Amino acid sequence: MKVVIFAILFLAVLSRCDRFDENLIIQPLLDGKLASEFRFITTAQNKDHFVVFPRTLAHVMEKFNVREMHLSLTQGRWRYDKWGEPLSPTPVGAELIALFHNSHNITDQWKGLVHALSGLLCASLNFLDTTTQSTYASGVVSGLSSDPNFRYGTLSHETVCTENLTPFKKLLPSRAKCGLGTLLSSIKMYDSQFHSIGVHFESSERGYELMQTITVVSDLLYGRTNRVFTDFELSRVFDQHQPILKCPFAVNTSVLIDTSRLEVEGVNPFADKQIGFVKPNNIAETSGRHEHLINLVPGTPLSLKFQFNEKVNIPSEYPAQIPIIATRHESNTPITAELSLNVENTLDTQIVVHYYDAIPWYFRMYWHTLTVVGGKVKYINRRTARERQRPAELEMAVLLGPRENFTVSFNFDKVFLKYTEHSPDANRGFDLSSSVLYYTFNTSDNATTIPLHFPPHRDINRIYTDSLLVSLPTPDFSMPYNVITLSSTILALFFGSMFNALVRRFNEELLPKQGLLARIFQKLKSKKS
Amino acid sequence: MSKTRWLLLGALAVSIRVTLFALEFDKTFSNMVEFTTPTTSFKRLKEALHLTDLGMSPYSSSVFIQPPLTLLPFSLPKVYAPSQTYITEQLWPRALFILLDLLMAYLLCRIGALTYKLKILDRIPTAESYYKNLQTLLPAVYLFNPVLIASCVSMSTVIFNNLAIAIMIYYALRNNVILSTLGLSLACYLTVYPLVLLIPLIVMFHQIADVHAGKNVGVNKSIIVKVILWSVIWQGLLQYMSFTIMGRSWEFLQQAYVYALSVADLTPNWGNFWYFFIEVFDHFRQFFLLMFNIHMLSYIAPLCIRFRRDGLFISVIMIAITSLFKAYPTFGDFFFYITLFAMYIPLSVHMRYGFSIVVLMLFTMLVGPAFFIAWVQKGTGNANFFYFVTLAFLMSQVLLIVEFVFAKLKHNYNLKKGVVEVTKEHSE
């Protein structure tokens, strides 16, 4: 077996076209949880010949002319207030961002792409091609001043589970059988507070680049009553008892331990209390102030153990972890409801907050009710909704002073839908997907367009609000036949009685009333005579 | 009607409406499905005005589904005061709706006076004083009907439609083809349904010609040609005006007419369409849309044959039929034709179910809003509750129309036979 693996590795190195790297970032969080992000990066320099690059994905991307694609499938909420800025910002559910090479038939290409991806990752992304779900043919999100080759869609109702993880693993050159991939145990993955799968693809002159990410926030204190930081081992967190060896396919396998999140506003509550980890022997290591990088070398297993030298209590309050706090509410009133978003600047400096929201057509938005309180509005872009075609889109930038907040609110009507347009679980309600926010410290006027998705990580300070569940009035789903019958009866009744009246002759009313027998008798009598 | 009486009526009517506006009842009424439908909602009109202010087409969103000229009266003050003020935003629209109601009352008063002068209503000798008082009765019934007051306060644009029809009737009685067809064209411009009034209008002009000549003048081709020609001219002019103010684009046709006729908006109302088209199977949708819209045409010919010389009665019945069976009817529609029916109240001697109809109508009107709240707001009932109430209401209206037709037929028969009729009070 080993011979085969080394043969493949040899081939990979020989061909020099594909490269695979894997790394893991581990960040202990202030509330005793552990955030870890796996990044598997596969690159192909030759677009026709692949060694480790997933051919299935490359074919799909080539067929639909995709230049850049970012897909995320997320379960659970990222707690901005406790955990700070996310490692990779994602909304709840599925999100797909795509940039195409040319603008011919973008709608068809998008349709093909979502169907292919839904097959590839076993997700219901195919719902993104219907207009009842939020699909926006807009350049608003991209910030690329309305790039016609750009498409964006979210499905906040999407549930993410092992059925998505398995096909995800198949895209890895290691098939998750070696290296860091062995830590991807689905039982532990889905027993976590937050879980997100990301597939990021880019096609350029340099070739193809694919980055697969998995972000997991594990609850180390689950089921415990004492709120103290406790020692833990990495292999236990992911339920992996085999030794973690360097993946033979990977050029680099590294683990980065980052304790910067335990430090808040320059003051480390653990400064005097020594947090450390037991370093495995024979492993190359570089250190920063908060960062410790471990590069795995072949043949030496990785075993990481975190030790807290003294019992440190988990703080019960969390100072602001993030420059802006955004909350969104729906008034939950029948028929006409109000949606309001509140954004607060927690810093002592001026910032510009960009806000994007897409309201599906089944929430009929009224633009004349749009009000912005607080802040200084730099610009507002509006795109109106078309029933059964496209959602309403709102984008704005607001300049916020130190510790200032602003509120955006507008009214919308809950549209009455045909009974076939309701989902099978109609009384659950309809999802209003997360609004997108990002902030910059550049307050000059010409800095209005900042791409939301280039590059996918860290450089953009993007934030998503929670998605909302809005209940729509439902008809009775068992009624079609009854309604057809009864409503038609009204028409028939009117038609019938109207024509009965109009063709009536009143002559017979003057005749004395006679019974049926008497009339027959009379008739016979008259015939005889 | 004397001037003091007019002033008294008008002042009272205005003060009721102003009080209701001041107490902000417009917020309540404008959200009630009884008074506003997608095609008459003032909120949607405001949205269209807002989009126009932003430099966008009012039809860029699918919210506004009325023809473009309805925006004109509301954007008029902006010509003089470009900045948004309390007067242009709040006061002017409210004042306009009150003024339109007064104009309507005036037209009804004139219609009442003219019908008496021309003696074109039914000849029931004992009801002579009733016909004489019609000029006071009609506007009073209109101005002080609580439902119509609420309809006015809800700022429902159904008033435009009703006003256009009233103009049509009034000028037809004055034998003025040009202005009468303007009324008809305006009504057709707002919703397509009043198109069925074209033939009744021609019959009405024949009726007026008969009255003036004092005998049956027969089919007058010049009247037919004139009415049709002027209707086409006015309609063309209105459409061309809309085309021009929409920046030379016909995109409004789709949303102002096709959208409403295809019942794409399924907001509940008191008509027969909404629940049907929520529930109907998709492959039957087109068929039923055709049937529901086209069956109204089937009543014109039989009505014209049976009431050959009574154009006014045919018109009133056709107004009732279109109001009842249009896709988005409001109480403003229903009570407009009920107001017109007041001209034929003396016929009620021949009615069989008058009492039951009134009771059924009042009962459903009281229960309906409660059931709607139970369904949509409280979640304690489902859509069927409200649907069945509207069905019962429609039933009462169906019976009401048929009763009037039946009574009229009986009356005509008695006239032919020379039977002298007496009203109920006299017979007792």
Image: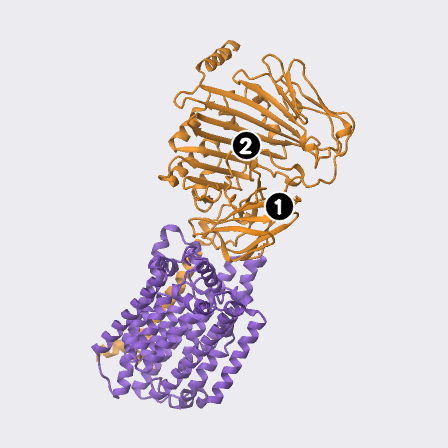
Chain colours: A orange, B purple
Is the residue marked by circle 2 packed among few (<14), some (14-19), or many (20+) residues within 10 Å? many
Q: Is residue A321 left or right of residue B426?
A: right
* Residue ID at (49%, 82%): B10
Q: Quadrant of residue A305?
A: top right
Question: What amino acid is labelled 2 in the image?
Answer: Ile
Give percent across and percent down for residue B233.
27, 70
Q: Which residue is mark 2?
A: A197
Question: What amino acid is labelled 1 in the image?
Answer: Gln
In depth, the one of B369 and A18 nearer the eye is A18
Calculate the distance from the C-alpha at mark 1 to the C-alpha at mark 2.
34 Å
Q: Are marks 1 and 2 on the same chain?
A: yes
Give percent across and percent down for residue A409.
57, 54
Rendered view: A99 above or below B51: above
* Residue ID at (57%, 75%): B19
Mark sitting earlier along the chain (1/2): 2
Q: Is residue A31 left or right of residue A107?
A: right
Q: Which residue is mark 1?
A: A350
Which SS class for mark 1? loop
Give percent across and percent down for residue A344.
63, 47
Chain hosting mark 2: A
In depth, the one of A473 and A47 nearer the eye is A47
Which SS class for mark 2? strand
Give percent across and percent down for residue A289.
68, 26
Instruction: Please identify the quadrant where the N terminus of chain B is shown.
Output: bottom left
Q: Is residue A499 visible?
A: no
Q: Is residue A325 visible?
A: yes
Q: Is residue B209 left or right of residue A489?
A: left
Rendered view: A344 above or below B418: above
Is the residue marked by circle 1 packed among few (<14), some (14-19), or many (20+) residues within 10 Å? some
